[in-house]
Image (cartoon, helix red, strand yellow):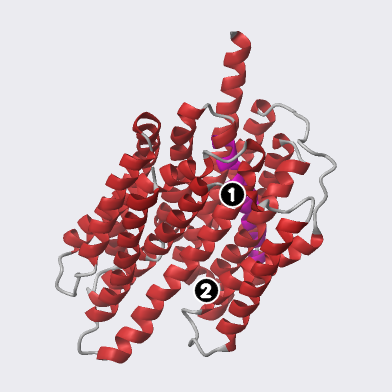
Amino acid sequence: MKRVKSERMSVYALFAIVVLASASGNLSQTAVNAMLGDIMMEFNLTVELGQWLTTVYMLVLGITVPVATFLSRRFSVRQHVFIALAFFLVGAVADLLAPNFGVLLGGRVCQAVSTGMLMPLMQTIAMTRFPRGRQATAMGIAGIAMGFAPNIGPTIGGAMSFSLGWRSFFVLLVAIMLVLGVAAAIAIRPSAAPDKGARLDVVSLTQSTLGFGGLLLAFSNASSFSFESPFIWVPLVLGALFLVLFVRRQKRVDDPLISMDIFASPQFRAGFIAQNLLNASFMGVTLIVPLYVEGLCGGTALEAGMVLLPGTVTALVLNPLAGVLTDKVGARPVALVSGAFLATGAVLMSFLNADTPLYVTTLCQAVRAVGVSGLVGPLTSWSLAQLPRPIVADGSSFCISARQACASLGTSVMVFLVAVVGASAVGVANPALAYQLAFGFSAVMAVATLGYIAAKVR
């Protein structure tokens, strides 16, 4: 009995460490958005160059995630965690002490590698180390790292940059990594690697890097260039081509980077599509809402942050609660109710204009956040639940990579609608239409998410 309890506590400690480390990575990814102004001023950067601090993080994260499956086979969990924490610590220290932009960018790369290693591991632990009746609860807790952390990032980053200087944020990250490193040394037991003989297929790695990296770069560039620009269609075409080659190769090689056997499960296929629809719907809104508040309503950056804050806090509470409810009543009722909240909030936001009171915008965003919080964890756990244990890590990695691409695509479409379609259609006379188009796209994707859940999630 004592041994079982000890093993259970060890799993809880491991999971807590990985969740906190993943949350730190996602926090860092978005916090820099609020610090860009101060960073660009200190290093005398252009906006285009400064944006690479965000873009490179997204690219490296998307490229690293598929490799995490190989790492989980080649190394023990303890080794995996320590390698990831070491990457993050090196990156945070580099950014803290950065004398120039190059060092700062290198630090961001290290942090993104760490986050890409940790996110799939976190989901795999939730699905393989917890009993079936607790898996959705564990995934709901993981949702704090996936949903709450990136949403609260700009608020924390902006507040620390304004009051203590932008480097203070990296002091916080260094402190967190040191504490987690000590905790990991104490709590995570040594274990054997699942497959020490696992070999990395370099061709698959190259195809994955060019495939996911090309798509992410193309979608990222879509907000800065016209669709005729080679900066969009060249990486888009190459990314799609190499992704097709990657998938084909995974079906043929004996030791694939990501096993395509994951798609043999109808439940995984359905959950995979639902997750991608969801991410295309909600990720871009956190970027568009501040632009709407400040650009159309004449609000301040503080007011923009306050509009997002209630929804962000909602995610902190509802992510774990949604997981608990999923374990008790199943994924379908939780997903249907949450999808209804998401669709309702998104549709209401498509009617916002310059005269809409900010409290109404805040309420609509909070309703959306309730929906998102109730969907992220349950859909993820439901998708992975029927996969054989040896390929859960494969499913987790492929889902995360695809979600990154779909979130980037959805964000790019919304930015395009605000910056190009709305402006060219109405000029200065009715700029509200630009934001209504962007929010309308989010609403269409939200309704599609709800409809797909109603049809496929059982």
Query: Can you tell which mark lies on residue 167?
Result: none
Taking the magenta stretch, the answer to whether it contains residue 112 is yes
Please give the range of residues in magenta.
104-126
Question: Is 58 rendered above or below residue 130?
Answer: below
Secondary structure at badge 2 equals: helix
**Residue 303 appearing in the image:** yes
Q: Quadrant of the N terminus?
A: top right
Where residue 126 appears, as percent x and y from the top left, is: 54, 36
Secondary structure at badge 1 equals: helix
Residue at the (43%, 69%) spot, across then down: 411
**Residue 158 appearing in the image:** no
Camera-side residue of 40 and 136 = 136
N-terminal-most mark, 1 or 2: 2
Residue at the (32%, 50%) spot, across then down: 454
Q: Residues within 10 Å of mark 2 (few under 14, many from 20)?
A: many
Residue at the (53%, 69%) spot, across then down: 39
Q: Describe residue 6's horizontal placement relative to residue 403 as left or right.
A: right
In this figure, which residue is indicated by the disc labeled 2? 220
Q: Describe residue 31's horizontal placement relative to residue 330 as left or right.
A: right
Query: Can you tell which mark lies on residue 264?
Result: 1
Question: Is 82 rendered above or below residue 399?
Answer: above
Cα distance between the residues tagged 1 and 2: 31 Å
Q: Describe residue 101's horizontal placement relative to residue 141 as left or right.
A: right
Q: Residues within 10 Å of mark 1 (few under 14, many from 20)?
A: few
Q: Amino acid at mark 1?
A: Ala
